Image: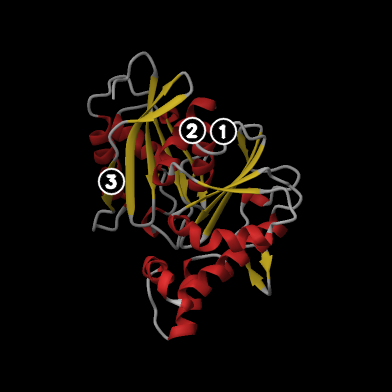
Amino acid sequence: MSTGSGKSVLVYDVGGSHVSAAVCLDGAGAYRLGQIVTAPHPPQQASEAFVAFLHSLGGQAAAGFPGVLGAALAFPGPFDYPAGISRMRHKLPFLFGVNLRQALAERFRWQPAQLRFLNDADAFLWGEIGAGVARGVSRSVGITLGTGIGSAFALDGRVVAEGPGVPPSGEIWNLPYEGGIIEDSVSTRAIQGGYQKRTGRLCQVSEIAAAAPGDPAASEVFADFGRHLGLALRGALAEFAPKVVVLGGGISRSAPLFLPAARLALRDIDIELRVSTLLDHAALVGAAVAWFTA
């Protein structure tokens, strides 16, 4: 991909087991990714090793792209995004309290201001706003379906963390739902638990999805998942009243198995469910969209 006359930024999507990096070009609002480099976390569980790993991955992704303006990194929470300091204890605990902005700035020989951090669910929605199925939508919500449920809210093309109808930090995973919280019923463990209860077997979500066409138990589990997703969104998004909800994350790849039930639960509400077309690239593109929009 040629950089042409556009501006480029190095972008990262930091997951629980893998990290992806690429250079993203902003050519008059048309966001394009260069080569995507993905690798599992280094075996050494130490902050120094992880910073070196991020630097190396970014160097590979940025090779051949002179004039990169800086880097935008999508991280899961809890994380102090303005400061660039991780507050996670359950994931990547060796990064807790580490000033990643300063550490990476030293590695790249950049000013700290050239490194910015954002929530991974926010990055997902930024990507859909800039180059996906939420482009041009006045009120949208991004939902990532995986180990847990991530969420982000956007108004007039900008992700927001507060305002009427927006829960604290834009998070819905811990909102009350059927005697527990939403994540109890809308997550990987909900699908696995439902299938295990029916069959006595603990399987990966991908295995359950693959079995669904000929396995009534698998089909029922995904229908239940869709119903809970629709009902949970119905309650959590009522005040914000988005026009479009974009679904992403690993479970969204099995959307045909649960979308009918989710749409049925929302049948009398003016909310359109759309499945991401950017999929794994959404957070990478979104990190760049957030950078250039800011």
Q: Which residue is tagged 2?
A: 131
Q: Which residue is tagged 1?
A: 135
- Which image quadrant for residue 154? top right
Q: Amino acid at mark 3?
A: Thr
Q: CA distance from mark 1 to mark 3?
A: 27 Å
Callout 1 touching callout 2 (CB < 8 Å): yes
Residue 165 location, x and y as percent? Answer: 74, 48
Callout 3 touching callout 2 (CB < 8 Å): no
Question: What residue sits 46% from the left and 53% below the top?
Answer: 249
Is 77 placed above or below 231 here? above
Q: Which mark is residue 38?
A: 3
Location of the C terminus (image quadrant): top right
Graded by Cα atoms within 10 Å as few (under 14), some (14 to 19) or many (20 or more), the crowding at tag 1 reads some
Earlier residue among tags 3 and 2: 3
Query: In screen coordinates, is 115 left or right of 271?
Result: left
**Circle 2 SS class:** helix
Q: Amino acid at mark 2?
A: Ala
- Examine the rendering and report whether any part of residue 293 can be seen: yes
Query: In screen coordinates, is 54 left or right of 99?
Result: left
Q: Outermost residue toward the top?
A: 5
Residue 115 location, x and y as percent? Answer: 42, 33
Question: Nearer the observer, disc 3 or disc 2?
Answer: 2
**Circle 3 SS class:** strand
- Which image quadrant for residue 226? bottom right
Is 165 placed above or below 215 here? above
